[in-house]
Image: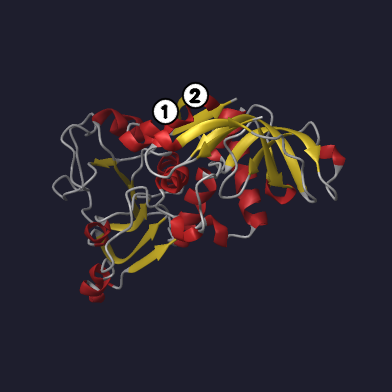
Amino acid sequence: MRAVVVERFGDPSGMVVRDVADPVPDAGRVVVRTEAIGVGGVDVVIRRGALGSFGFEPGLIPGNEVAGTVTAVGDGVDASWIGRRVWAFTGETGGYVDLATAGVEHLTVLPDGLSSIDAVTLGSSGPVAHFALSHAHFAAGESVLVRGAAGSIGIAAVELASQGGAKVVAVTTSSAERGRRLRELGATVVLDRAGHPDDGAHGGDGSRGGDGSHGEPDTFDVIIDIVGGEAIPAFIDRLAPNGRMVVVGVVGGMPSPDFGMAVMRSFRKSLSFAAFSLDTIPVGERNSVRAAQFDAAASGGLHPVVHSVLNLDQAADAHRQMDDGTVFGRIVLTP
């Protein structure tokens, strides 16, 4: 089968397509013939070599979520899985392949009416957004800022916060067109990447928000941050009293070592800062939320946004687009 291999960390040119042996499932695992493969922000961070301390080494196959049909099962797995359409988590790596393997506990059956492409657009990002809002103790009537809302996690967070009764759903993005599309998904305030009102991304009534001059908040009860990077302290300063910031990604890099001083400088505001990983949520809870979100997407209640669909051989091109910051939604690879 074909597999995309990161032979050299750094820019996408270090990714190559290789022929490798077809997998044989170990006990408790299955083989999935992939129909769609999600390209996520964590794949990009791993490919850059930014997570070397976590044990990633050259030669790895990136990707962690696929959708397709189960073709083989290992010992201890019910043979009735064979032929079923599923979403699968392959682990931190191993997804950019024709034939993927996954533990049976990491499978979610796809409902009728949901494509494999939509499944890998929502399968990881939807649960991350759901549990990040829960981790932030978000409640109806609160204001929410989603930093880096143009990716699949950010889009899901915007839509879920809006459906959850947020008073204001603000987003940071880089263009008026992205702002318009995010408003269609529930955003009410659009800010630029620095968190300031975007003159080119206001609503049809001319409202901009974000600076308090149009009745919109300049601070927020909850901030969901997918970007990370050096600007984290500036966004901590945008928290309202008792505000909570939850970081779910670092596609913009790690913050400076002293970023926590922003919390301490605002000691009397009782601010909270947290990192969140889906790894801390029991698998059964993840699967339950994912299945419910798949049903909602199949019925039109949630809206997976696909930026483009590329062939597996174009994985490096997908990563170049991710590095350029031009992606709105998720890039999906197909065999």
Q: Which residue is rendered at x = 40% and y = 65% of the image? A: 274
**Relative to 71, 12 lies left or right:** left
Which label sits on residue 310?
A: 2
Q: Amino acid at mark 1?
A: Asp
Q: How many marks?
A: 2
Point out the image quarter for the C terminus. top right
Q: Which residue is rendered at x = 48% and y = 30% of the image? A: 315
Closer to the camera in the image, 20 or 125: 20
Can you tell which of label 1 and label 2 is closer to the viewer?
1
Which label sits on residue 43?
A: none
- Against 86, is 290 above or below? below
- Against 100, is 225 above or below? below
Q: Look at the numbered discs 1 and 2 and tell me whether their residues touch, using CB distance below 8 Å.
A: yes
CA gap, disc 1 and disc 2: 9 Å
Q: Which residue is rendered at x = 42% and y = 49% of the image? A: 165
Q: Residues within 10 Å of mark 2 (few under 14, many from 20)?
A: some
- Tell me if I can see residue 299 in this picture: no
* Residue 3 coordinates in the image, percent (x, y): 59, 33
* Residue 201 coordinates in the image, percent (x, y): 22, 33
Residue lying at the far left of the rendered structure: 213
Which label sits on residue 317?
A: 1
Closer to the camera in the image, 157 or 31: 31
Which of the 4 quarters of the picture holds residue 1?
top right
Task: Please tell me whether mark 2 sits on a helix, a strand or a loop.
Answer: strand
